Image (spheres, coloured by chain):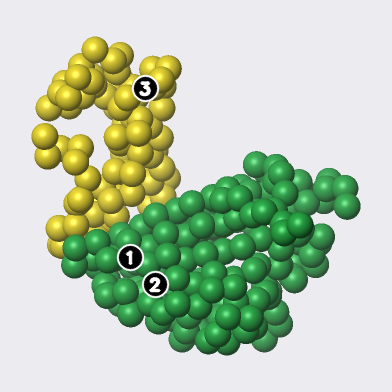
Amino acid sequence: MAVEFKPKTIYVIYIAATSEKVWQALTSSEFTRKYFWERAIEVEPKRGGAFKLRLPDGSVNVYGEVLEYDPPHRLSVSWQVARPEEFRKLPACRVTYDIAPAGDAVRLTMTESHSWEVPDAILSGGRMGWPAILSALKSLLETGKVPAIKMEPPKEMIEAIRNLKT
Amino acid sequence: MDTGKVLEYDLPRRLSYSFHPEHDGLENERPSRVTFNLGEINRQVKLTVTHHDFAEGSKVLPKIRTGWQSVLSNLKSLIETGKELPPFWTGDYDKK
């Protein structure tokens, strides 16, 4: 039986840009390095292709598979965290970006879906992180500048992962 | 018109008010509450909006649920670029 993924975190932001520009910002490393805490994205432009987020030292932070690739409307990837190492015991989740026109602006929706009963403590990491990442993306596209958002490591999430029985 | 009372006013960290829509048959529902929290680090602000304390079976909640994202996106654009977003509001909340 296919595993069912349920949306657990949804974040919506409106951006004064075209869908194509938002798509480019989501899928090109030139952009992600600026707003996604210096991570470089790699997306093979097809369903079943490889997806990676690399840290500045080149090591893989997150990897997965491209599940949907429909520019400039929808990108969906499986999301397995490789580093920090203790995050590896988390089952892969799915991250989907939906881009929809909203007048002359664009509505970007990020949906994080999970296949298991994830504790809120584990979800807290993404719930802190996504608003910062997507706010920085919006600033980058609208002003050309990115605020350097300082953020503590998600302590509650790390603690919950340590206590997770596998 | 939506009305309410200021419940907390702690400039520039916290603002809280009651929220009472007086239209569309919503006027009989008891007010909910909106709280804004501002946290500042390195001249950047993390704004957290919590709309809470709704009446059970609230008719207001489903109407406002998708509104905040657009309001806050607009606020961010206005502050950072001096211009609000191009008009995109498609909801029917304040058209009636």
Task: Name the disc covering residue A100, or none.
Answer: 1
Task: Name the disc covering residue B58, or none.
Answer: 3
Q: Residues within 10 Å of mark 2 (few under 14, many from 20)?
A: some
Kindly state the secondary structure of the residue where label 3 is placed: loop
**Chain depicted in yellow:** B
Does residue A32 show up? Answer: no
Residue A84 image position (x, y, % from top left): 75, 67
- Above-or-below relation of B68 to B44: above
**What residue does disc 2 label?**
A73
Per the model, the C-alpha gap separating discs 1 and 3 is: 29 Å
**Chain depicted in green:** A
Rendered residue at 71%/44% (across/down): A117
Q: Residues within 10 Å of mark 1 (few under 14, many from 20)?
A: some
Q: Residues within 10 Å of mark 3 (few under 14, many from 20)?
A: some
Tag 1 subunit? A
Which quadrant of the figure contains the N terminus of chain A?
bottom right
Same chain for mark 1 and mark 3? The answer is no
Residue A24 image position (x, y, % from top left): 40, 81
Mark 1 and mark 2 in contact? Answer it, CB < 8 Å. yes
